Amino acid sequence: MADLPLINLTIEGVSLSVPKGTLVIEAAKQAGVMIPHYCYHSGLPVAGVCRMCLVDIEKTPKLQIACATQVAEGMVVNVHGAQAREARKGVLEFLLINHPLDCPICDQAGECELQDYVFQEGRARTRYTPTYAKRFNPVEDFGGDVLYVPNRCILCTRCVRFMDHVAEEPILNVSERGDRAYIGIHPDRRLDHPWAGNVVDLCPVGSLLSKDFLHKARAWELDKTASVCTGCSQGCNIHLDTRDNVVVRARPRANLEVNQYFMCDHGRMQYRWMNRGDRIEAPLVAQGDGLVAVSWDHAFARAAQILRGASGRAVVLASPRAATEALFLAKRLLAGFELTAAFRVERVSGEAPLAGVPNLALRGERAPNVMGATLLGYAEQFETALQALNRSAVVLVVDDPLDGVSADQLRAAGHVIYLGTALPDPARAAHVVLPVANVAEEDGTFVNRDQRVQRYFQAKPAPGMARPAWWVLGELLAELELGGPFTSAAEAFAWLAAEEPRFGGLSYELLGTRGAVVPAGQPAGVSA
Amino acid sequence: MGYPHKPHPKEMVVLSQYFGDAEARTYDGWVKRGGYQALEKALAMEPAQVIEMVKESGLRGRGGAGFPAGVKWSFMPKEKKKPHYLCCNADESEPGTFKDREIMRWTPHGLIEGCAIAQYAIQAEVTYLYIRGEFTEPLRIMEQALAEAYQRGVLGSNAMGTGKRLDMYIHRGAGAYICGEETALMNSIEGRRGNPRIRPPFPAAYGVFGMPTTVNNVETLASVPHIINRGGAWYKSLSLSHPKSTGTKLFSVCGNVKRPGNYEVTMGFPLGELIHEVCGGVPAGRTLKACVPGGSSVPILTREEAESCKLDYEGCVEKGTMLGSGGLIVFDDSADMVYQIMRLARFYAHESCAQCTQCREGTAWTVRILQRILAGQGEQKDLELLLDLSEQMTGKTICVLSDSCAAPVVSGIKKFRGEFDAYINGTRRPRPVLVHA
């Protein structure tokens, strides 16, 4: 785009220069002017049907739609002039005559573009005679996670265009004509494409709804937190929506470098485990036959005692779902040992690509930080590491669920320190259990498959005494006078960036909410 | 026009010369009447020369918009990099218009010849004849003529023995009015839903299958052989009023006249004479009340306006209406204008493609208000509302279907307000209409 000539224009009195070919609606965003629209979406081909973005362009006889008009030299655009406002007021009145106005029972209420624009520039009262019937069609289950409520539909066709041009599985259409029109689905097909859930986000009104989220919460009760999807190694940027400290849904967050505006249905369902109730709520130490809850100070003292007293070999069994910070600090903690650092990851054969977006798919590697672990020198050699346990003085488990690992296997090592969110049976063999926060409860970073380091933010508090792994490991490092402590994840990351050449120059500030690719170079610890 | 009535002396018979003459439908019959000479002549010319000749004739689009045909052709890329297409718009579905049907029924070879010449002029390999789904008889006749044209070597890979490729395919519509809109027609040919496209890009740059395309009406194309045969200057001389409106025009006359049918007159012919003399006037004992000169989409004319209107593009605009497709609907004093306007609006509400908000919702709302007025439940403010909705439905959508719905409503309320008032204030007996078509 850089080599395109610049075009000068004025939008609502703001002068700006944008590359040739830019649409007026996009140029307006840069001028800080939001032109109301329904059918237009930056991630979809232009349809130009809702007629909501009509603007007044000087020297053109008729109002023009900003979504299909390219900028021209010297163009003067009036978005909020009387003529354009009147036209949009007309569109809004037309859209409402067949709309049920059932906002009180509609999931979209509070995040509905129809509500927003009517409130912003619509009529206070309709002129539609109340005795006229409104169009009625029954609610239809489109399959997958999608429910279609045709009465609320404004026929913007975003869903149709998504399936046609982005998912490239054209099974939705506009059926019938005139005001009888509705969104139709292929009679023999269901909306079960792995990325079909995006139509719910794309729908500007409450016509396409998520069955999973149905009647769960009102939009205004939700807190939104920027996060990164944990479903696979793609690292789609997402929002976690929480209500009363419970994650109720995940939605895509735009990042043109990674996932554009989309996320897959598998990723959407990841929020569920973030709310699991069987969490470890206090540090535990082995005493007699069992584990007893102790204070953090007590637990740190016990762990430090173990580590000071041990030498020789050590093993880290890490989860590729753990934060980059935790993976780094775990290795630093055992720096004095002859260390075997390993992870394992669930692999599913085959990917589920979103055809219309390059390099976007639900990946076979079903964990978000495989690349982070790899860059930090962890090897995907879990079995080898298990075999090394009986020769090791210490094993540190970092949130691996320990499926298929027995307590006896762990006990083969001299000491077991378990850092985790929940307590699987084999972990009861640990000498010290340190409860940590999950992805929704801490700040941290993941590195996606394209070596892009991306931050995620805390969306809710951790249960009980559980703390972020960077804090726990930082305290322990401090106890051993090896580093730390840290007062924030940013500090932990700063140490990581200073110590690990592949992360050199990166900082939380630089990563922002969109992330950055690690500087080029041979990943440490990768053998061919 | 020669069918079903003998031509009226005031008619100027060019296109309709062989209407009613079944022998003219066959290849041999057509050649005997001088057919395919124009094509032969055109194929010996340079394409640019053909375009020049049509430009000179002043021939304008007969589908409604009245855009100069030669100019439209000249928009096609001169240097050919991709396949070009010609689409013959035979989706004649404007209420009150039935001229293209007669051209196809009686002079199918005339249309094929016109298409072939235009196709050659714009350097298109293929013509699509997009025929309205309801036209079963014209379809059968066109198919027969097309088969004959291929058989006799008029069309094909060696058209008229010149080595040039001229292919022609019939594509049958499924009965949607909107498919007569040129971009919707192209979508329909491609097998998509017949929705109008946003312009730009225009068809000459990005048309059917994304290739440079010209879309012309049947009557426009059928006029081309006559221009080639007799010269642009001759065609240009056929003008009774404004020099920019040339040639002859078929008018499909229906409604309250003694002899409804297709009549061909020279551009600029007085509308009053067409109704009162050529068509025999309104039925005995009745008087002319109003008429729609260009198919249902154009503003209605009162008797006074109609009787002083010249039938050409400029003459109609002068009276605040449009020549349109030449579908002349005549109303006498027995006509209920409120009902007639409701009936027109209902057509548009039924045919709206549902893309643009104003059209999808506005046309249907307009019908409901008109039906309410007819049922005696209307209020004065409903008329203001109708006018306001019409304003919102004009000039704000992708195509002009919603403008077409608004035009008769606005002109009807303006010119026949008394009839609306009568329903509203109860002086006229209510006429409840079954809700919605």
Image (spheres, rainbow, N blue to C red):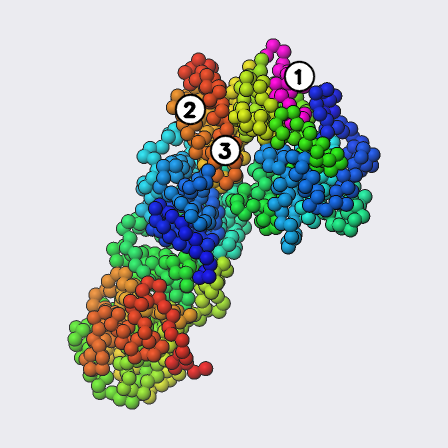
Q: Which mark is residue B277?
A: 1
Above or below, comparing residue A416 to residue B32 in the picture: below
Image height of B350 relative to A27, above or below:
above
Crowd rating for badge 3 (residues with CA inside 10 Å; few <14, some 14–19, many 20+): many
The residue at which mark 3 appears reads as B403
Question: Residue B156's x, y, as percent?
Answer: 76, 48
Q: Residue furthest bottom?
A: A312
Q: Is residue B258 above or below residue B390?
A: above
Looking at the picture, tell me which residue is in the foreground, A117 or A271: A117
Please say if A328 is above or below A184. Answer: below
Q: Residues within 10 Å of mark 1 (few under 14, many from 20)?
A: few
Earlier sequence position, callout 1 versus callout 2 = 1
- In primary-sequence order, the first of circles 1 and 3 is 1
Mark 2 is surrounded, within 10 Å at the Cα level, by few (under 14), some (14 to 19) or many (20 or more) other residues, namely many
Magenta part of the protein: which range? Answer: B265-286
Q: Mark 3 or mark 2, which is nearer to you?
A: 3
Q: CA distance from mark 1 to mark 2?
A: 36 Å
Say whether marks 1 and 2 touch (CB < 8 Å): no
Q: CA distance from mark 3 to mark 2?
A: 17 Å
Instruction: Give the spatial CA distance, label 1 vs label 3.
Output: 32 Å
